[in-house]
Amino acid sequence: MKLTRVTITDYGPYGGENPFNLQTTDDQPIVLFGGKNGTGKTSFFTAVQLCLHGQSAFGSRTSRSEYEDHLRDYLHESNGHQATEATITVEFEYGSFGSTDHYTVTRNWRDRGKSIVEDLTIKRNGSQLSDLEKDQWEDFLKELIPPGMSELFFFDGEKIQQLATAIENGDDFQDSLHSLLGLDLVDRLDTDLQIYLTNKLDESGHEDLAAEIEELEQEIEEYQDEQTQVEDRLADKTARLEEIETEIEQLERKLSQEGGGFAAKRDEHQERRAELNAMIESLEEDIRDLVRGSYPFALAPDLCTEVVDRLEMESKATAEITAQNRVVTELDELAVKDAIWDDLDVPADKSGDIIRTLQSELFDRLADDLPDEIHLAREFSERQRQEMYTIADRSLSEVPDELREITDELERATRERQEIEDKLSRAPEQSVLSPLIKEINELNEERGELKTEIEQHRERLEELENYIGRMKQERENKIDRYEDLDDVSDRADLAQDVRSVVQDYQDKLAQRKLERLESVLTDYYLALSNKSAFYDRVNIDPDEITIRIKTVGGEFKNQSQLSAGERQIFATAMLWALADISDRPLPFMIDTPLGRLDQEHRENLVRNFFPDASHQVLLFSTNTEITQEYYDILEEDIAAEYHLIYDEKMGQTHVEPGYFWSDGSDDMLHGNDIEIDTDHQVQLEGFNNE
Amino acid sequence: MSKGADFNRVKLDQGVTNYLQYLQSTTGLTPNYLARTGLCYSLSEPRPPNPEEYDTDGKAINRYTLLGEHDPLYIAMVRQRLINEGRDPDEELYKYFVAHTNRGIKTLNGRIDSLADFYDVLPGGLKPDE
C-alpha cells in the first residue's frame, strides 16, 4: 500500500482544504514534514488513522459517544470561529493479485449540536464500490488495512517509549509480542471453537430419540391398519343399511296399502319412535361427553379430595416457609440498621435480644402445622395445580347431578320407546299383515343396530385421524431434532478437528514468526546500534519469549541491562522487524523518535532506518531533530517536503512546500498561499519525482 | 426403557383388552376413555391391586391419548395413593398405574352394560337423593 495524497479540511490546526501530495518512488521513498511543536504533525498522523479506521482508530474499547467527543474536538477552530464540518480524504494505491487499485477514502463529519453525523465514501479507481453495501465499507477498510496491523506502521516517540518500557518489564511484553505477531487472532479462534464445542456437545440423547421415533412409527402403523379395517367395515355396513332401508320402504308401502286404519296409527307411532331415537342418541352422546371429560374423577371422590387438600396445604406451607425465611432475613437486616434503634428508646445491648425474640416468636407462629415434607406439590406447576382444583371441583359437584338428570331422561325415553316398539309389534289379527309387520320389525331392529355401529365406526375413524395426525406431527418434530443432533455431532467433530489443526498451526506459526523475528531483528538492531561490533546477534527463546542479545564474546545480555537510549533503539528495531515480518507492505509514518538518543544512534537511524524502513516513509520532524546535517544525508531519498507553519494571528497552520531552510523548488509557489491542485493527475512541480 | 415415574406408553393385559372391546361395543366409548374410568374406579377401592396378576400382551395406548389434558390430576391421584400405602411414588408409579387401570377395566366390565350404568357406579355419597 502506498499513500498518494492526503487532503485535510478543517481538521485540528488545519483550516480550509490542505492537500498533501505524497507520491514517492523506490529511489525516493521519503516525504519529509517539517514543523515546530504544535504545528499539526501529530494531527496529520491521527487524521490518516481516523480516516481509515473511524471509531477503531481510538482503540477497540472506544464507545460511540467517546468517539463523537473526539470528532468534535478535532473540528478546526481559529479566530474564534469553530468549524462545524471536517473532511479527511486519503488516496492510496493498493496492490493485490498482481494489479494495483487506486482507492479514495473520504470521511466527513458534521456537528449537529447533539450528535455528529459521519459520512464515509470509498472509491476504487474513481468509482464507488459497487460490490459492497454502504454499511460494509468500514469492515472492508478493516480487512484491507487491519487497525492492529497499521499500528505497527505508525511510529511515534510515545509508542517507542511504551515498547521500550514494556521490554523492561518483561511480562507485559510477552503479551504484547503475542498480539504484535498476529497470534492473538489464532488464540481467539481457538477459544471460539472451544466455546462452540462446549455449547453444542451438551445436547445428547441421540439414541433415545431414535428409539422413540421407531416406537412412534410402529404406533402410527398400528393405527393406520385399524383405520383401513374400520373403513372397510363402515363401507359394508353402509351398503347393508341402504338395502334394509329400501326393503323396509317397500314393506311399509305394502302394509299401508293393505292395512287401512291401523296403518295411520302406525305412522304416528313410527314418527314418535324416530323422535325418541334421536333424543336417545343425543342423550347418550351427552353421557359420553361427560365420561370423556371429568367424570372418571367422580368415581374416586375421597382420593380426589385428598389430593386437592394435600396440594393446597403444601402450596400454603411452601409459602409459609418462604415467609419464615423472609422474617429471619428481614429482621437480621433490621438488626444492623442503626436509624431504627436510634428512634427507639432501647439500650444498644438489648436490640439483639429483641430481634431474636421476635424472630423466634414469628418463626413459631408461621411454623404452625407445617407438613413433614412437601412431596406432591413439587411434582406439578402452579398452573397445573390450579387446573386440578377446577377439574376436581367440577367432577365432584356438577358432574354427578348432570349425569343423573341425563340418565333419568335417557331411561324415560328408552322406556317410552320400548312401549312404542311393543305397540308397533302388536299386529292386528290379520293374517296378511302380521308376517309383514314381523318382517318390518326385524328389519327395523337390524337397521337400529347398523346405525349405532356405523356411528361408532365414524367416531372411531375421526379419533384415528386425530391420533395419526398428532403422532405424525410428533414424529416430524422428533426427526427434525434427530437430524439437528446428527448435524451437531458432525459439526462438533469438525470443530474438534479444526481445533487441533489450529493449535498445531499456532505452534508452528509462533515458532516460524519468532525465528523470522529473531533473524530480522538481529539485522535491524545491528544496523541501528552503535555497538554492532560488540553485539553478535539477538536471541529469542521461543518458549519463554525472552529476548537476549549475544555479544561477540558469546555472552548473553538481557534487555534490562540496556541503557534507556539503547532500549529505545531496540524498540525501534523491534517495531521495524515486526512490521517487516507482518507481510503487509504499508507505508511507515514516523514521528521522529530521536529525542533521547545520542549522536551516533541518531545518525544510525537517519542513515539506516528512515530510507529503508519501508517502500514509503512519511517522516515528521522538528528543526532540532532532522537538522541541516541530517537533512543533507537524507536529501537524495526525499520525494517531497512540506513545511507546517503555525500562524498565531490566525490560529491555524499553513502548509508550504519545502523544509525549514529549503524552499523546495524556487520556481513554484510564492507567498503563503498554497495552490491547491484539485486534479491529482496534475502533480506540483518539484514535488513530483517520477 | 425404564418406567418409573416417566412413561410415554402403557401396555395393558390381554384379557383386559378383550373387556375393553366389549365395553366399547356397548357404550360407544373408545378404549382410552374407558381406561380412565377404570383407573379411577380401581383407585376408589381400598384394597391395592396386584401388579403380578396382569400381563403386557394386550393393547398399547399412548400416554397422551390415555390421559389427555387431565394427565396431572390422574397422576397426582396415583401418587397420593402410593404415598398412602407407603410406596415410593417415583419408583412404582408406572407399575401401579397399569395395575389399577387393568383392575378397574376388569371390574367395570361386570357393572356397565349401557351408558345409563355410568351413573349407577358412582359412589353413593355423590348421589344426593338416594
Image (cartoon, rainbow, N blue to C red):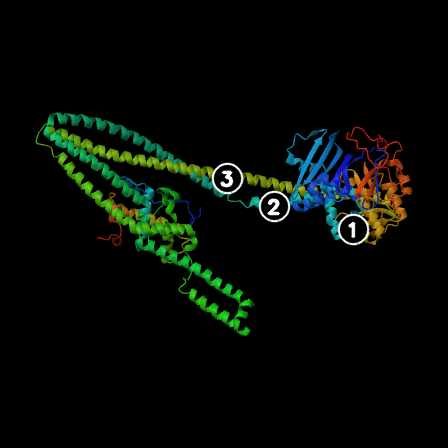
Percent across and percent down for residue B81 are 36, 55
User: Looking at this view, is A338 or A660 the one in front?
Assistant: A660
**Horizontal and vertical percent position of residue A193:** 62, 43
Dot 1 amino acid type: Ile
Q: Chain of mark 3?
A: A
Q: Which residue is mark 1?
A: A167
Q: Earlier in the sequence, mark 3 or mark 1?
A: 1
Query: Which label is found at residue A195?
Result: 2
Q: Residues within 10 Å of mark 1 (few under 14, many from 20)?
A: many
Q: Is residue A533 visible?
A: no
How far apart are labels 3 and 1 at the CA level?
Answer: 55 Å
Check the residue under mark 1 and report the chain it is in: A
Separation of residues labelled 3 and 2 (CA atoms): 22 Å
* Residue A471 picture quarter: top left
Quadrant of the snapshot with the N terminus of chain A: top right
The label number, if any, that marks residue A482 in the structure image: 3
Quadrant of the image occupied by residue A91: top right
